[in-house]
Image (tube, rainbow, N blue to C red):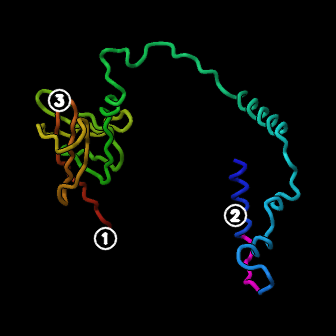
Amino acid sequence: MKKILIITLFILGSLARPVFADDGGGSDGIEGMMDSTSTVEDAFVGQKKVTDETFQSTLNAVKAQQGKGKRQIRPFVGKDYNDDSNSGSLSEVTAKNLLLGVPVVLENGDGTEIPIGHYKIVGEKKDDKVFLDFYQSYTLVARVPAIETTSDFNEPGMYFIKLTPYNEQRVKIIYGSMNFNAYTFIKIKEEISDQN
């Protein structure tokens, strides 16, 4: 580490000095430049040399200070998440919590407005009907009817949710889970502009 530092300082020191053209005074090329530049030791003029003992004592003092503020790691007490035979892996649980970013204000068929924002989408199949529930936090914002399909929409994963523009008035939302795949069309709410 010290060698790298010394070499770096030497290079920076030699680059920082102006280079003058040879005036024909005897030395030429690299030899002349080396004679006129300072040595590596000149870079440390005025600094106190640190002995190995001083360095080690300082390093030990810093390590002792760092150890004082650390918490003790205690073993986990209780049931591990993967011990439950009904639960899957953590990636499956997070995949079931699908998030959808809605960039425009949408209007559901029943007149419910879905404002711009991020929503957790939960698909539900009830009495042979499919619904996509839009949640913000734990609040149900809208329940949108959907159409069940066997298509996977060429999506690479088993769990997916995607909003794509369909036309000027509607967006298409595709949904996929382990239980079913579905799609729906939702109307884009028209903004009423003020004309004065």
Q: Looking at the image, which residue is at 69% across and 47% down?
A: 1
Q: Where does residue 78 sit, x and y in percent of width and height?
A: 47, 12
Magenta residues (range): 16-23
Hey, what amino acid is under mark 2? Ile
Is 21 magenta? The answer is yes
Whether pointer 2 and pointer 3 mark residues with C-beta atoms closer than 8 Å, the reply is no
Q: Nearer the viewer, residue 120 or 27?
A: 27
The image quadrant that residue 147 belongs to is: top left
Hey, what amino acid is under mark 3? Lys
| Gap between marks 2 and 3 measured at Cα | 71 Å
Q: Nearer the viewer, residue 35 or 99?
A: 35
| Gap between marks 1 and 2 measured at Cα | 69 Å
Q: How dense is the environment of label 2, judged by Cα within 10 Å: few (below 14), some, or many (20 and up)?
A: few
Q: How dense is the environment of label 1, judged by Cα within 10 Å: few (below 14), some, or many (20 and up)?
A: few
Residue bearing mark 3: 125
Residue bearing mark 1: 195
Hey, what amino acid is under mark 1? Gln
Q: State the mark number for residue 11.
A: 2
Q: Is residue 124 above or below residue 5?
A: above
Q: Is residue 166 above or below residue 12?
A: above
Q: Nearer the viewer, residue 107 or 119?
A: 119
Q: Where does residue 193 sit, x and y in percent of width and height?
A: 30, 65
Nearer the observer: mark 2 or 3; the answer is 2
Q: Is residue 103 above or below residue 66?
A: below
The image quadrant that residue 133 belongs to is: top left
Q: Where does residue 4 sit, x and y in percent of width and height?
A: 68, 52
Whether pointer 1 and pointer 2 mark residues with C-beta atoms closer than 8 Å, the reply is no
